[in-house]
Image (cartoon, helix red, strand yellow):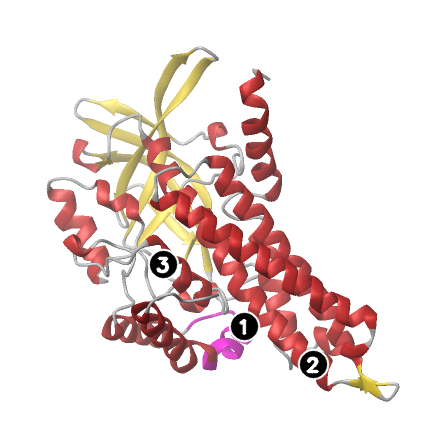
Amino acid sequence: MSVDTHETELMLRTVRSFMEAEIFPHEDLVDRTANVPEELGRQIEARAKEVGLYAANMPERVGGGGLSMKAMSLIEREYGKTSHALHSWIARPTELLLACVGDQIDRYLMPAVRGEKRELFALTEPEAGSDAMGMKSNARRDGADWILNGSKHFISAPRLADFAIVFAVTGMDETKRGPRKRVTAFLVDTGTPGFEIREGNKSASYRGYKTYQLSFTDVRLGPGQILGEEGRGFELAGQWLGMGRVWVGTSCCGKAERIMALATEWAANRRQFGQPIGQFQATGFKLADMAIGLRTADLLVADAVTRAEEGRLTDADVSMVKVYCSEMLNRTADDAVQIFGGMGLMEELPIQRLWRDSRLERIWDGTSEIQRHIITRSILRPFGA
C-alpha cells in the first residue's frame, strides 16, 4: 500500500520493525502451543508503549496516540500479517469508552488507555450470533439499580479482562414495524458478584487468541454502570462494529500480501519439468488473480476510510469492505496452498497456519451472509422493498 507523507513512512517503518522484532519470532511457538505466555504478552504490551503504538487509536486528549483513520488503517494492515493472538496485545481500546462520563472516565477510560485495564466487548450470545435482536440477556430496574441476567459467548481477548461492556435488553419500544427491543450497554467489573467468566471454545484459527463465556446471575449494577444512555446500546455497538469491519478488511489485505509474497517466492524457485512452476499458466494465473484481488481490496478499504473521515460511510459501504476483503483473502490463502502442493499443508511451513487463520475472517464481526443481507437491504430500501 502506498504512503504519501514522510510521517506516514516513518510510522510504517516503526510498525514493521516492531513486528519483525517482537511478533514474528513467536508465531510458531504460539500456534504450536495454542497459548501466548503471560510474560511474552506483557513484553509486547511494554514494548508497544515504548514506541507509541499502545492505544494509538485513541485521541490525544485522553492520552492516546491520536492517529487518523487513514493512519490506523495502515497500521491494522501490518498487524493483519500475523496472528491475532499476538498483535492483540498491542491494545487498541474500543472507542466506545469515549462515551464514559463522570467517575467512569477515571474508572474505565483512562486505565484502558494507559494499559492498566483491559475490556471485553460482550454482544454475541449462544442463541443469537448473527441475530443481535435475538438477544436474551436482560436487565431490569430495581430502584435506582439494575439487575442483569443472561450469558454471552465467543467474546474474544488476548487475556482475562478487567471489565466487560455488556449489552442487554432493558425494555421494549413501539416502532412503525412493531415492538423492538431496547438495548443498553453496561460496564461490568470482573469479580462482581453473580458475574462468572471462563475460557470458552478453542478455535483452529488464531490459536492462542482466547474466547470467553460470560454468565450473569442477578448481577446488581448501579446507575453509574450504564455506558452512554439507557436504550442506546445498539447505536454504541454500531459505532464499534462499523469501523471494526473496515479494520477486518484492511487486516485481510495485510495477510493476503504476506501470503502472496510466500506463494510468489515458491512459484519462482520451485521447479518442475525443467522450469519454475510459476511459468505454468495454471500457477501463474493464480498469482495474477491474487494481485488483482489485493489491489481491488486495498482500493475498497481506502475508499471506505475516506468516506468515514468525511462522515459519509454507510452500513453498505462497511459490508462491502468486510465481505470482499475476507473472501479475497480466503481465495488467496487457498490458491497459495495449491501452489505449494503437499508442502502447503505441512506444519514446517507457515502457509497452513495462515490458511487456517484466514478462514475465520469470513465469520467474525458479521458473516459474509449477513454482510450481503445488509448490502441487499440498502439496494432495495429506496424501492420500499
> What is the chief secondary structure element of the magenta stretch?
helix
For label 3, count other residues whose C-alpha is less than 10 Å away and answer few (under 14), some (14-19) or many (20+): some
Camera sees residue 204 = no
Depth check: 91 or 58 in front? 58
Write down the region rendered in magenta.
25-36
Seen in the picture, residue 113 relative to 230 is either above or below; the reply is: below
Which residue occupies 50% across, 28% down?
Answer: 134
Q: Secondary structure at mark 1?
A: helix
Asked whether 285 falls inside the magenta stretch, the response is no
The residue at 76%/71% (across/down) is 284
Identify the secondary structure beneath mark 2. helix
Q: Position of residue 366 (x, y in %)?
A: 53, 43
- Name the front one of labels 3 and 1: 3
Q: How far apart are labels 2 and 1 at the CA level?
A: 22 Å
Residue found at the very far front of the displayed protein? 4
Q: Nearer the viewer, residue 8 or 101?
A: 8
**Residue at the extreme bottom of the image, as rendered:** 274
Is residue 81 found left or right of 288 in the rendered image? Answer: left
Q: The C terminus appears in which quarter of the rendering?
A: top right
In primary-sequence order, the first of circles 3 and 2 is: 3
Residue 153 percent across, percent down from the top left: 47, 45
Residue 369 vertical position relative to residue 256 in the rendered view, above or below: above
Q: Quadrant of residue 329?
A: bottom right
Snapshot quadrant of residue 266? bottom right
Which residue position is annotated with label 2? 266
**Residue 367 showing in the rendered view:** yes
Residue 238 against residue 34 in the figure, above or below: above
Q: Nearer the viewer, residue 185 or 333?
A: 333
Q: Position of residue 104 (x, y in %)?
A: 16, 44
The residue identified by callout 3 is: 72
- Disc 1 target residue: 31
